[in-house]
Amino acid sequence: MNEQAQNLTRAITGPIILITVGVLFLVDRFTGFSFGQTWPVLLIVIGSLRLLGGGRRKRDYIDPPPPPGGAR
């Protein structure tokens, strides 16, 4: 995933979580499901956003050199 896509995912994470919480409260208010029954959806949304964000590495990260004498 390129840096622009990571920045976009990072930028929309907060709003998506807030929208999800709002929808869960609406479901609590207008249906027979309570927030206590639907809060795991929030974990699913957060986990999905983390997966979309991909592995984030520091820009200055350099792989360590191979061990002396070759790989064993």
Image (cartoon, rainbow, N blue to C red):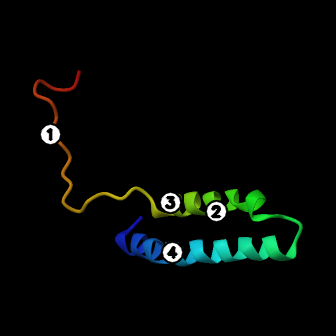
Q: Quadrant of residue 41?
A: bottom right
Position of 66 with respect to 31 (left or right) is left
Label 4: which secondary element: helix
The image's mark for residue 21 is none
Residue type at the position of mark 2: Leu
At 68% from the left edge and 56% from the top edge, which residue is drawn?
A: 40
Q: Residue furthest left?
A: 68
Q: Earlier in the sequence, mark 4 or mark 1?
A: 4
Q: Which residue is mark 2?
A: 42
Marks 2 and 3, how far apart in space?
Answer: 12 Å
Q: Which residue is mark 3?
A: 50
Give the image location of residue 5, x and y in percent: 43, 72
Label 3: which secondary element: helix
Position of 4 with respect to 69 (left or right) is right
Marks 4 and 1, how far apart in space?
Answer: 38 Å
Q: Earlier in the sequence, mark 1 or mark 2?
A: 2
Give the image location of residue 15, x and y in percent: 54, 78
Q: Earlier in the sequence, mark 4 or mark 2?
A: 4
Give the image location of residue 68, x and y in percent: 10, 27
Q: Which residue is mark 1?
A: 65
At 20% from the left edge and 46% from the top edge, which residue is drawn?
A: 63
Label 1: which secondary element: loop
Residue type at the position of mark 3: Arg
Marks 4 and 3, how far apart in space?
Answer: 12 Å
Which one is in front, 25 or 60?
Answer: 25
Marks 4 and 2, how far apart in space?
Answer: 12 Å
At 54% from the left edge and 64% from the top edge, which residue is drawn?
A: 49
Residue type at the position of mark 4: Gly
